[in-house]
Image (cartoon, rainbow, N blue to C red):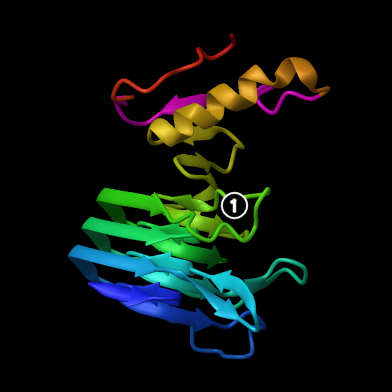
Amino acid sequence: TLNTNHFAGGIVGWVLNNKGNIQVPFVLDNCHVKNSVITSAAEQVNGKWDNGDKVGGLIGYACFGDPNEEINAGAKISNCSVDNVSVKAYRDFAGLIGYASHVVIENCSADNITLEQDLTHDYKAPETPSTFGIMIGRDNGGNTVDGKAYVTDGVLEDSDANYHILNAAGLEWVATEVNKVAAQAANIFDNKVVYLENDIDLNGAEWTPIGD
């Protein structure tokens, strides 16, 4: 059990190289986290509520590129797993990496993950953040999973700009994007293929049909 307010992970809490000034890349290989509970609660900072964020089953915060300067400083996470882990925080939390930028993820898994958003001190309200997910909580760009670009939780994009759907969250993203096409001038699915990579069980969740 790990209780904190900021930057927490089952293996690494915080690692940063967003300017490319360190030539040795960050590598995390064959690391595994099982049967753990990680909690990050908001705290008072200079008289205001803050933090309760950057929390992951494997890594809390991993930033290896500057999206404004197109710098990729080098980071690779491979052959790692997180299993039967509960993560509770306010924002930027995930089963694998809470906050990620320019991270290469290969052959990693996050299974039997329980995510709980702690809204005790909802200091971003009314714009309560929804930056949490199974693999990555807050995607700050440049991340790849098994050679495909990370789009959102459960959605990857290959080199042909086609989408690969991994789980229920990814399928929900497809439904949301398709169902709002009528209100938009552009359709992000034009001339693209959407691949369903796994059998998906919605576990009785309320569902708006795709195209409805």
Picture coordinates of residue 122, whole percent (x, y): 57, 57
In the image, what residue occupies the spot 32% across and 64% down? 57
Picture coordinates of residue 45, whole percent (x, y): 60, 81
Residue 203 seen anywhere in this rendered image of the structure: yes
Residue most toward the left?
35
Residue 193 seen anywhere in this rendered image of the structure: no
In the image, what residue occupies the spot 32% across and 75% down? 3
Residue nearest the observer in this picture, 204 or 174:
204
In the image, what residue occupies the spot 25% across and 60% down? 82
- SS assignment for the magenta stretch, majority: loop
Q: Quadrant of the N terminus?
A: bottom left
Q: Is residue 194 magenta?
A: yes
Residue most toward the front?
47
133 horizontally vs 74: left or right: left
Q: Quadrant of the C terminus?
A: top right
Q: Which residue is mark 1?
A: 129
How many other residues sit within 10 Å of disc 1, few (<14), some (14-19) or many (≥20)? some
Identify the magenta region.
186-201
Picture coordinates of residue 175, whole percent (x, y): 55, 22
Label 1: element kind? loop
Picture coordinates of residue 5, whole percent (x, y): 44, 76
Three-letter amino acid code at disc 1?
Pro
